[in-house]
Each structure stands twice: as structure tokens, then as C-alpha cells.
């Protein structure tokens, strides 16, 4: 666990996250999701019809899932592949970390 945290800290300092090439796209998508959340709050505050609110919740959920899958894809293509090239315990740790992230996404 500590080694994985140290590896992540080193990655962060190096700015070598796989998603960095699409950072602006992710930020735009997250801003839209933030707007959707504000819209949902407004709908509840204005006592809109339940099904309309649920439809918007579904849209927001799908948008978040899309961001998560994109980040996961970037992580696999960049971080995991680089660790696999290096081999050793770092590769095993990255694969385990990715597997755990996939499991969390599947459960959610």
C-alpha cells in the first residue's frame, strides 16, 4: 500500500499521468457534469416531477461512467503498460491497482 502511494506520488510529480493529453476534454466533461448536478438541485428545489429528475440522474450517472471509463482506459494504456515494461513488483502492483479500480466501477 505504501509503495503504491509512493509510486503515485512520483507519477504526480513527474506529471506523467496518461490522461494529461486529454485533460482539457476531461475538465470540460466534468464541468458539464457539475452543471447537471446544479440542475438536479434546482429540479428538486422546484419540486419537478420525479421521473424527470430520475431521467436527469441517469444522464449524469452515464456521464460520470464515461469519464471513469476514459480515465481507466488511459491508466491501462499508460501507467499499467509502462509498469509492465519495467517489470517486477511495480508491474504486479499496477495490475492489482487497475483490477481493484475495475471492480469498484463494476460494483457501482
Image (cartoon, rainbow, N blue to C red):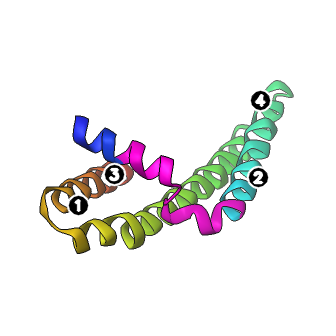
**Given this view, does label 4 or label 1 mark the residue nearer the observer?**
1
Does the segment drawn in magenta span residue 20? yes
Q: At which x and y percent is residue 59?
A: 66, 55
Q: What label does residue 101 carry, if any? A: 3
Q: What label does residue 95 carry, if any? A: 1
Q: Nearer the viewer, residue 50 or 94?
A: 94
Q: CA distance from mark 3 to mark 2?
A: 24 Å
Q: CA distance from mark 1 to mark 2?
A: 31 Å
Q: Say which residue label 4 marks.
A: 44
Q: Say which residue label 2 marks.
A: 32
Q: Which residues are magenta?
A: 8-24
**Secondary structure beneath disc 1?**
helix
The residue drawn where x is 74% and y is 43% is: 34
Q: Tell which circle, 3 or 2, labels the residue nearer the N-terminal end.
A: 2
- Mark 1 vs 2: CB contact within 8 A: no
Q: Tell which circle, 1 or 3, labels the residue nearer the N-terminal end.
A: 1
Q: Tell which circle, 3 or 4, labels the residue nearer the N-terminal end.
A: 4
- Mark 4 vs 2: CB contact within 8 A: no
Q: Tell which circle, 1 or 2, labels the residue nearer the N-terminal end.
A: 2
Q: CA distance from mark 4 to mark 2?
A: 18 Å
**Residue 32 appearing in the image:** yes
Q: CA distance from mark 4 to mark 1?
A: 41 Å
Main SS of the magenta part reads helix
**Given this view, does label 3 or label 4 mark the residue nearer the observer?**
3
**Secondary structure beneath disc 2?**
helix
Amino acid at each position: 500500500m505504501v509503495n503504491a502511494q509512493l509510486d503515485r506520488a512520483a507519477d504526480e510529480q513527474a506529471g506523467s499521468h496518461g490522461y494529461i493529453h486529454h485533460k482539457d476534454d476531461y475538465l470540460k466533461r466534468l464541468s458539464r457534469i457539475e452543471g447537471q448536478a446544479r440542475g438536479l438541485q434546482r429540479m428538486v428545489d422546484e419540486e419537478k416531477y420525479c421521473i424527470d429528475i430520475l431521467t436527469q440522474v441517469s444522464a449524469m450517472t452515464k456521464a460520470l461512467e464515461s469519464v471513469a471509463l476514459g480515465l481507466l482506459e488511459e491508466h491501462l494504456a499508460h501507467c499499467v503498460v509502462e509498469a509492465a515494461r519495467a517489470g517486477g513488483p511495480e508491474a504486479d502492483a499496477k495490475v492489482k491497482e487497475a483490477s481493484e479500480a475495475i471492480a469498484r466501477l463494476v460494483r457501482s
